[in-house]
Amino acid sequence: MITTKALTKTFQSGDQKIVALDALTFSVPEGQFLTITGKSGSGKSTLLYQLGLLDEPTSGDVLIDGNSVVNIKEQERTMIRLNDLGYIFQDYAILPSLTALENTLLPLLMQGLSLAQAEKKAAHALARVGLGDRMHNLPSALSGGQQQRVAIARAIGHDPKIIFADEPTANLDSETSEQVMQVFLDLNKEGQTIVMVTHEADYAKLAHRTITLADGKLVSDVMNQK
């Protein structure tokens, strides 16, 4: 589902060139739950942003479903992000003035679905993450874990090929984090490909596979016992 070839990202800081990602090459098969770990500044989120087409690498290649997505027009990248990918961030990134249902259906409307179609798919997505009875609540009436599940529902509403999650449990207590992780595990059991950045070793081990970065290099790539 994802392949990287010598993926490299550098930043310029004055006269100094900072190598955030150093020629990473690996593949993620369809249906795999992959976690990315490493110390702060190791390149975890930078890698996720390259894989999720939220940023462009300095060199190398990223293939999604066999197709290179690096040297394509921005309009094509936008359509791939909208139709094929789902994103979940640690700060939830949901709109406070919209209900859970309205937050979830926004990307579906952007895809061109009618309001009725979008509402039906959004309601189904919220039910899948255990929020079928809270869909008309504003974020202010939801707990942090519930808000994160709204973000997950929004990400899965259009049946994406891949879900990208950047530290999705970072702002949650341990019990709520476990609930959110269970949602990811349930989605993966249904065949969803997931790539998740996490600093929690226990959560990383719940996935099929964990890669570890250090100074932009891939230093470990292990299959977890499940």
Image: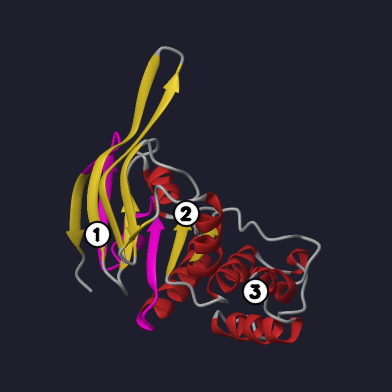
Mark 1 touches mark 3? (CB < 8 Å): no
Nearer mark to the viewer, of 3 and 2: 3
User: In which quadrant of the rendered image does the C terminus lie?
Assistant: bottom left
Viewer can see residue 158: yes
Element assignment for label 2: strand
The Cα–Cα distance between marks 1 and 3, rounded to whole angstroms, is 29 Å
What's the residue type where badge 3 is placed?
Answer: Leu
Element assignment for label 3: helix
Q: Residue at x 50, y 67 (%)?
A: 175
Q: Which of the labelled discs sits on residue 166, or is there none?
A: 2
What's the residue type where badge 1 is placed?
Answer: Ser
**Quadrant hosting residue 188:** bottom left
Above/below status of 120 relative to 4: below
- The residue that label 3 is drawn on is 108
Q: Residue at x 64, y 68 (%)?
A: 107
Q: Residue at x 39, y 49 (%)?
A: 70
Q: Residue at x 41, y 12 (%)?
A: 15
- The residue that label 1 is drawn on is 27
Q: Where does residue 11 sit, x and y in percent of width and height?
A: 42, 27
Mark 3 touches mark 2? (CB < 8 Å): no
Q: Where does residue 151 sit, x and y in percent of width and height?
A: 60, 66
- The magenta stretch is 189-218
Magenta span contains residue 127: no
Instruction: Give the mark nearest the N terminus, 2 or 1.
Output: 1
Nearer mark to the viewer, of 2 and 1: 1
Q: Where does residue 169 sit, x and y in percent of width and height?
A: 49, 59
